[in-house]
Image: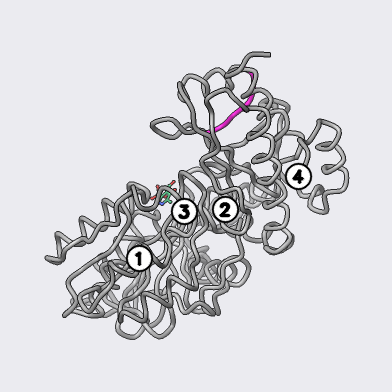
């Protein structure tokens, strides 16, 4: 593939089957290139309208009656829609609640509790801070041991079967992995690694923050046990919008989660003296659902469902391929390199470049209206959101980066 030109980018935008989706979002002229939708997606117009309706009608006029008129059912209803459009999950296994961090604590605690004789949790050192901290917290509260996969081993190609296999054994209770590495963008083999974990008699806990809404996911078919993820990246639900929890149906009966609240009780208005958990996935709730956040998740999921995850992935691959090609060609001999895989089948929705002074380069790009994402110590992530990112933005951003690091 030759280095894409500005005209190539314009031609790709003109032929883009998802181009019309950009109109469904509130987008201003500044910034000129927004490549940070993998941290915070853009606001859908439908979300703005839905939240206005929620405030003006459901809350202002119906007041507390709205809980019974539908609000109380939203965590499971929207969970099922997310399951169908994004996760490959049959109904009854997904719920919207809390943050990814809190949800990971809940599911990992529950996962470890399924096999009390097994005393080890496995995670890679390069995983997102939340995942590492929660694994340590659950290990310390249940008296378990953490088996760390060293970051030096996963730097080349993420967590692979060869790297994971020697860490598994009769003592393994659960393995926590991210489907897409938040720094390098490596896309793990979710079905293959899940099968490996099962062969060792352990359960899988997947963090889908960087894959939900960008990569097709087939949790049921892969036999995944537990998964969590956030809604404010590729699902465009807004800052701090609630996250999701997936628990495979076969585990729902035996589930004991560590933050039992009145909203996960069997009869929430019984105010029972003793906690009795709700049947099904509702048992993973804790307190009052964040209604404003959940309707925003609903609207984000609607857009993914309408576009179709396969079409989204096809554009994601085209966008990352262009970013990868441009970065390799125009950053050339500048001392900057591409940290993400060149092969699209093992790459998620972002492309990461690394080089000297990445923090100040990010700030200088922002001054030019190009928003990218610095990650300590030397990385810049180019996050590409297929429903809103144009090929033109990718071209503009990578050339602005080259201007800053190489000079015009
Ligand atoms: C991979 C990954 N896991 C977990 C989290 C934490 O999510 P939250 O802050 O919603 O708890 C993030 C946040 O960006 C993330 O990228």
* Residue 3 in sight in this render: yes
Q: Which residue is mark 4?
A: 22
Q: Residue 392 placed where, x, y %?
A: 77, 34
Q: Quadrant of residue 169?
A: bottom left
Query: Residue at 78% across / 36% down in the picture?
Result: 4
Q: Residue 182 placed where, x, y %?
A: 46, 47
> Which circle, 2 or 3, is nearer the viewer?
3
> Which circle, 4 or 2, is nearer the viewer?
2
Q: Quadrant of the C terminus?
A: top right
Earlier residue among tags 3 and 1: 3
Q: Which residues are magenta?
A: 368-373
Instruction: For label 1, count other residues whose C-alpha is less than 10 Å away and answer few (under 14), some (14-19) or many (20+).
Output: some
Instruction: For label 2, count other residues whose C-alpha is less than 10 Å away and answer few (under 14), some (14-19) or many (20+).
Output: many
**What distance separates the C-alpha of mark 3 from that of mark 1?**
12 Å
Is residue 370 in the magenta section?
A: yes
**What distance separates the C-alpha of mark 1 from that of mark 4?**
40 Å
**What distance separates the C-alpha of mark 4 from that of mark 2?**
21 Å
Earlier residue among tags 1 and 2: 1
Q: Which residue is mark 3?
A: 157
Q: Which residue is mark 1?
A: 164
Q: Which residue is mark 2?
A: 348
Q: Are marks 1 and 2 in contact (CB under 8 Å)?
A: no
Q: Residue 319 placed where, x, y %?
A: 70, 45
**What distance separates the C-alpha of mark 2 from that of mark 3?**
13 Å
Earlier residue among tags 1 and 4: 4
**What distance separates the C-alpha of mark 1 from that of mark 2?**
20 Å
Q: Is residue 218 above or below residue 295?
A: below
> Which circle, 1 or 4, is nearer the viewer?
1
């Amino acid at each position: 593939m030759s280095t894409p030109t500005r005209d190539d980018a314009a031609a790709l935008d003109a032929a883009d089957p998802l181009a019309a989706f950009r109109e469904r979002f509130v987008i201003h002229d500044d910034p000129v290139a927004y490549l940070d939708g993998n941290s915070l997606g853009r606001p859908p117009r439908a979300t703005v309208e839905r939240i206005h309706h929620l405030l003006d009608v459901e809350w202002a006029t119906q007041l507390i009656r709205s809980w019974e008129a539908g609000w109380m059912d939203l965590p499971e209803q929207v969970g099922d829609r997310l399951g169908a459009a994004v996760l490959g999950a049959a109904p009854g296994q997904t719920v919207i609640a809390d943050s990814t961090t809190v949800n990971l604590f809940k599911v990992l605690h529950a996962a470890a509790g399924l096999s009390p004789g097994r005393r080890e949790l496995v995670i890679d050192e390069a995983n997102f801070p939340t995942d590492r901290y929660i694994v340590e917290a659950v290990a310390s509260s249940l008296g378990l041991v953490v088996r760390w996969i060293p970051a030096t081993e996963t730097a080349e190609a993420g967590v692979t079967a060869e790297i994971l296999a020697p860490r598994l054994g009769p003592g393994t209770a659960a393995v926590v992995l991210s489907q897409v590495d938040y720094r390098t963008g490596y896309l793990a083999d979710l079905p293959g690694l899940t099968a490996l974990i099962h062969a060792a008699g352990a359960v899988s806990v997947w963090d889908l923050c960087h894959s939900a809404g960008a990569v097709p996911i087939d949790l049921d078919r892969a036999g995944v046990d537990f998964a969590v993820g956030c809604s404010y990246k590729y699902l465009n639900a807004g800052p701090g919008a609630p996250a999701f929890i997936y628990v495979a149906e076969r585990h729902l009966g035996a589930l004991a989660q560590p933050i039992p609240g009145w909203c996960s009780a069997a009869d929430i208005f019984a105010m029972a003296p003793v906690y009795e958990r709700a049947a099904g996935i509702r048992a993973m709730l804790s307190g009052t659902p964040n209604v404003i956040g959940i309707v925003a998740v609903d609207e984000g999921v609607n857009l993914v469902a309408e576009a179709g995850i396969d079409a989204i992935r096809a554009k994601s691959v085209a966008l990352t391929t262009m970013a990868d090609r441009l970065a390799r060609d125009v950053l050339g001999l500048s001392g900057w390199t591409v940290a993400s895989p060149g092969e699209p089948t093992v790459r998620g929705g972002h492309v990461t470049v690394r080089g000297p002074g990445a923090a100040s380069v990010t700030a200088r790009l922002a001054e030019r209206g190009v928003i990218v994402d610095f990650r300590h110590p030397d990385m810049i992530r180019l996050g590409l959101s297929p429903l809103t990112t144009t090929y033109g933005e990718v071209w503009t951003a990578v050339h602005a980066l080259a201007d800053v690091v190489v000079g015009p």
